[in-house]
Structures are given as structure tokens and as C-alpha cells.
Amino acid sequence: MKKKIMPCFGDKHMNTDDICHNEITIDSTDAERTKILADKNLTIVVWDRSKELQITDANESTTKGLRRFCTEQGIRNRDIRFHEFDKIIKFTRTTLRESITQMSKRGADLVNLGKLLSVLEPVCQNAIKIEVESYRHESRKGQDVKQVHQLLSAFHDGEKMYPVKITIHEKEKQQDQFYMVITVGEIVISDKQKEALANTGAVHHTMDGSLPDGGASFVISIPAFVADFKRDESILLKNLPNGVLSEEQKKIKEIVLEADRQKEKDIKILLSEKKNDSV
């Protein structure tokens, strides 16, 4: 598949009037989502190196550094807006904690979460909704989640693209009705892609081939961006419609979904056994 890459000229400053309702709903079929996403373009935001997370204390863990960074940059409790989600979500202490937990479970590099925080607002604003689904873990106690909105976004630093999955939980109750969890992956930009991006000005090379800065934001179609997803991006593959996936990606998606189904069965059995033991 030939990648469709276009330059991005500046960032749009968005207010609440700019927020629009997305077409993908919980009732959308796989075919409907495929049609919608096939025509979508995603802005790959350039990473802001000037706000890089700095950890100079050898005794400070990356987790502690992320918490400090959020405080220093005023990110905690900041209102986050989306083009394709018509609610404003706060980036809370819980958001950071759950995001760290989810990335740690998958062995993902928490440094990438620090990179995301420097461009959090434009990455969220440009996110594309890829699925709305029922909550997968209905058997777990204390959950009142009505539905879950899955959004895809990304940023780059000239060497790598960082796919971002934004999961927004919509709860039944009105107070604190929405909360989000964010995970960040990484994909190395190939030499061929760098050459194509250099032609748009999105990536800047020096004479020795190094990348002194990330260049600029650029736009790529959803199918072209997703084409680079491999097993490491399975957390995103499982929420994408089959129509934008390759045969290999479909196999990975089914393996992940089957693992989710088995995990839910195990939880139901465990809860049932606990209930019987308490009788």
C-alpha cells in the first residue's frame, strides 16, 4: 500500500465550539467503521523537545519523574478537548496512575509517556475515534461503565512514530462521568519513510544524517498509518475494523480478543467460586 503523506501547516487552536460529534457509535458495524476510517487522516504531532522530561536524580524513578513533570507543567486536572469526542475530560491523578499501570503491564517504555505529556493537548485534539464498545469486564465488582470510547492518535520525534491509544470510560452516574487512560507505543520510521517525510519538511536531516529536531507535524491516512502496526501494537489492532487490517494483523487481533474472552471467563469462574464459598 502506498502511503499518503501530506504536510501539515500549523496547529488549529480549538475551543468548545470546534468540538464535533463523531460518526462512530456503539451501533456501528465493522463495515461502517471501515468506510469511515478509510477516509480519515491523522495528524502525527511533532514532539516538543523543549519540554522533555528530565530525570537528573539517580534515586528518582521514571514513575516519580512523571508525577513531578505533571505538577511542574500544570498538567494535572487540565481540561483536555477532542475534535472527535464532544466532552471535555480532565487529566487527573487517576489518569496518570492508570496509564502508568497499563503501560507497565505491557512492558512499554514509560519514557514515551513522558514524551506524550509534552504534546498531550494537540495529540488528544487530533485523536480519531476508532470504536465505541461495551465494557468488556462486566463481571468485575464496582464497575458502572456504560460504554468505552477508543481513540487513536500519534506523535513523532523524527526517528520514531508513537501510536497513542486513548480509552475514555463513560460511566452511568453523572458525577465524574468520564475518565481516560492513555497508552503509548513506538514504531521506528524507516529510511524510506524518512525520505518521504523529508520532502514535506516534516523531518529535518543534518549532513551526517542525524536528526537535530523532530521537524514538523504531518498528516497520514489512517489505513497507511495502521499498515505499520505489528504485534506490539495489538492493543490498538483489537479495536480497529478488519477492513483496514492486513491478514496478518487480523490474526493478531483475533489472538488478542480470544485472550480477552478467556480472561473474562476466568474472572466469572473466580467470582462464582468466591460467591459459593461465602454461602
Image (tube, rainbow, N blue to C red):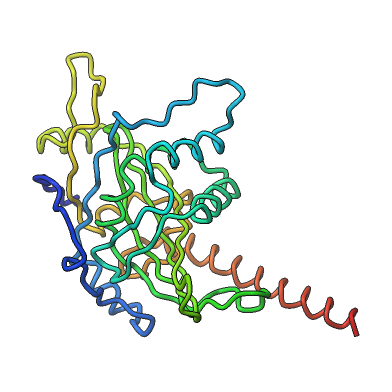
Q: Quadrant of the N terminus?
A: bottom left
Q: Quadrant of residue 268?
A: bottom right
Horizontally, residue 174 falls left or right of residue 269, namely: left
**Where 224 falls versus 238 (above or below)?**
above
Q: Position of residue 186 (x, y in %)?
A: 40, 42
Q: Nearer the viewer, residue 213 or 125?
A: 125
**Where 22 falls versus 229 (above or below)?**
below
The residue at 87%/83% (across/down) is 276
Q: Position of residue 60 (x, y in %)?
A: 58, 28
Q: Is residue 109 visible?
A: no
The residue at 19%/58% (across/down) is 41
Q: Quadrant of residue 107?
A: top right
Horizontally, residue 161 falls left or right of residue 93, namely: left
Q: Is residue 55 visible?
A: yes
Q: Nearer the viewer, residue 233 or 245?
A: 233
The residue at 26%/57% (across/down) is 125
Q: Position of residue 237 (x, y in %)?
A: 42, 60
Q: Position of residue 150 (x, y in %)?
A: 40, 66
